[in-house]
Amino acid sequence: MPTAPQSLVQDKRPVSSQYALLRGVPLFAALDDAAVEELCGYLHPVELKAGSSLFRVGDSGDAMYIIESGRIRITVTDADGREVILASLGHGDFFGEMAMLDGHGRSADATVTEDSRLAVLTRENFLNFVSSDARIVLEMLSAITRRLRRTDDLLRHRVSRNANEEDARHLTLADRAADKIARFGGSWKFIIFSIVLVIIWMAVNTMLLRAEPFDAYPFVLLNLVLGMMAALQAPIIMMSQNREAQKDRLRADLDYQVNLKNEMLLGEILRLLEKREKDAPKGYEDEE
């Protein structure tokens, strides 16, 4: 095992507290006691105030972080410019391992939501440690896989969508034509057009072509044309109405999913509040 730099060893807190912290991180849970104690020598503390930004998307990924106290919110901005919360992390959670591994920029934003104390493991120190124990590589891969699965599940179940946009993506040429015809058939333009057509038809056959009308009184051909127009217009209007009904069902389904997700989030918030209330007396006793 490599020896930690002297400056980091001097800055580190008691090994017992760091040891318990590392044992609670799935990434290092499989390491033996000697390896964990050695890894403690590579950690150094950082204290941050609530509201501060730890890093942003694209920032250099030169360290990973383990939360000793406080809370950190991990977010990304989607294509619509909205902030999507990937995770709200607390005591014992870790983050920043992806950018630390590949050395590329950060893939998300990290914001401090409560005054926090973090244990920092830099990329250089991590590479020195992992080169001496191959088991940590397998544990890191396993932890990253779980994190990616959780993120994929969160994004797959996003329900803040626009019903009109969702419907527009699946429109066909026939659907657009049906909408336009139904819109025209339900307007005053269509009523005026029908009246004008009937008047002109009757005037032509009774006045201009009185000797040889193509549709003499009682205008059988006109009745046939009007009947065909009504017969074709009815199913087209029904097609458009069915699409509107489908859009209403989609909107209702999205509203249900939003309400369900909010209910689950509220339940999680209440659970965390209850946990904090139970932990508060213990914190007061420790201070005394």
Image (tube, rainbow, N blue to C red):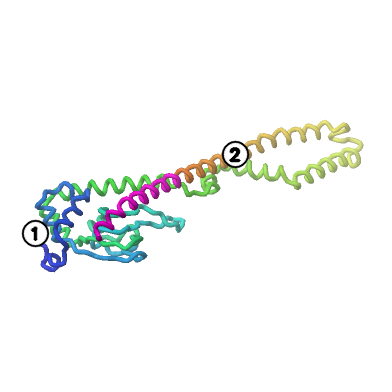
Q: Tell me what residue is drawn at x 22 percent, y 56 percent.
A: 101
Within 10 Å of disc 1 (Cα), the crowding (few <14, some 14-19, many 20+) is few
The picture places residue 84, in percent across and down from the top left corner, at 41, 54
Verify CB contact (< 8 Å) between mark 1 and mark 2. Answer: no
Q: Main secondary structure of the magenta part?
A: helix
Mark sitting earlier along the chain (1/2)? 1
Q: Decide which of 36, 19 is in the foreground and name it.
A: 19
Residue at point 12% right, 55% down?
Answer: 37
The picture places residue 138, in percent across and down from the top left corner, at 18, 47
Element class at badge 2: helix
Q: Quadrant of residue 234?
A: top right
The residue mark sitting in front, 1 or 2, is 1
Residue at screen point 52% across, 49% down: 162
Is-magenta flag for residue 281?
A: yes
Residue 52 on the magenta span: no
Residue 134: which disc?
A: none
User: Camera-side residue: 222 or 171?
Assistant: 171
Q: Which residues are magenta?
A: 261-288
| Residue 140 visible, this orientation | no
Q: Is residue 153 left or right of residue 231?
A: left
Residue lying at the far bottom of the rendered structure? 7
Q: Amino acid at mark 2?
A: Ala
Q: Nearer the viewer, residue 111 or 123?
A: 111
For image coordinates 37% across by 56% down, the residue present is 75
Query: How much space separates mark 1 and mark 2, taking CA atoms?
Result: 68 Å
The residue tagged 2 is 245
| Rendering quarter of residue 233 | top right
Location of the C terminus (image quadrant): bottom left
Residue 12, horizontal then vertical, whole percent? 16, 64
- Residue to which mark 1 is pinned: 2
